[in-house]
Image: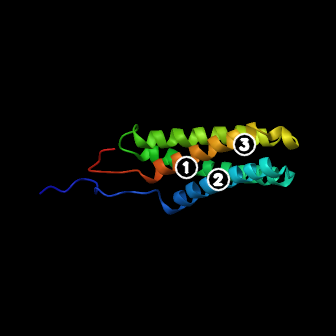
Amino acid sequence: MTVPDQPPYRTAPGPLHGILLGGSVSLFLGALFSDIAYYNTVQIQWSNFASWLIAGGLLFAGLAGLFAISNLLRAAHKGGRPLVYLLLLLATWVLALINAFEHAKDAWAVMPAGLVLSVLVALLAVVSAWTGFSNLRAGGAR
């Protein structure tokens, strides 16, 4: 019976990385819900909430991206899932930055592009978090 070099169990991101990744998902989802509320009520404060939530999501996603870069540099194979995870986080961050610029507009000028961008950013954040947390390691293969 041979013992694999690396155990064939699921390896999740470290605690701080996981908190940052989960925090970015919740902040971007909050921004999406705020945009939906703004679209339905036309109360400007919802747009302000979305702007702040997007800023927080950018911070958390950027820090999680630094962890993803570190993980990619330490990975045995520089391609595969760690690279896909980093690229998804990067795409999330870039679209969220564009969304932040969109939300800097005045009042109703945010709609509908801000809502569409919030949907895309929230979906990308969920997919990148799913990819980051489903990093499977089986005998060194990725």
**What residue is shown at x 58% (from left), y 40% (from top)?**
90
Q: Is residue 68 left or right of residue 58?
A: left
Please tell me which of labels 1 and 2 falls first in the chain: 2
| 4, 130: nearer the viewer | 130
Q: Amino acid at mark 1?
A: Val
Numbered badge on residue 138: none
Mark 1 = which residue? 126
Q: Seen from this angle, which residue lies furthest bottom?
A: 15
Q: Secondary structure at mark 2?
A: helix
**Residue 131 against residue 17 in the figure, above or below:** above
Image x and y of residue 76, in percent: 35, 44
Q: Seen from this angle, which residue lies furthest left?
A: 1
Image x and y of residue 111, in percent: 79, 40
Q: Considering the image in quadrants, where does the C terminus appear?
A: top left
Q: CA distance from mark 3 to mark 1?
A: 17 Å
**What residue is shown at x 22% (from left), y 54% (from top)?**
4
Numbered badge on residue 115: 3
Image x and y of residue 1, in percent: 11, 57
Mark 2 = which residue? 29
Q: CA distance from mark 3 to mark 2?
A: 11 Å
**Circles 1 and 2: CB distance less than 8 Å?**
yes
Image x and y of residue 117, in percent: 68, 39
**What residue is shown at x 48% (from left), y 50% (from top)?**
130
Please tell me which of labels 3 and 1 falls first in the chain: 3
| Structural crowding at the residue carrying mark 3, measured as other residues with C-alpha within 10 Å and reported as few (<14), some (14–19) or many (≥20) | many
Q: Is residue 97 visible?
A: no
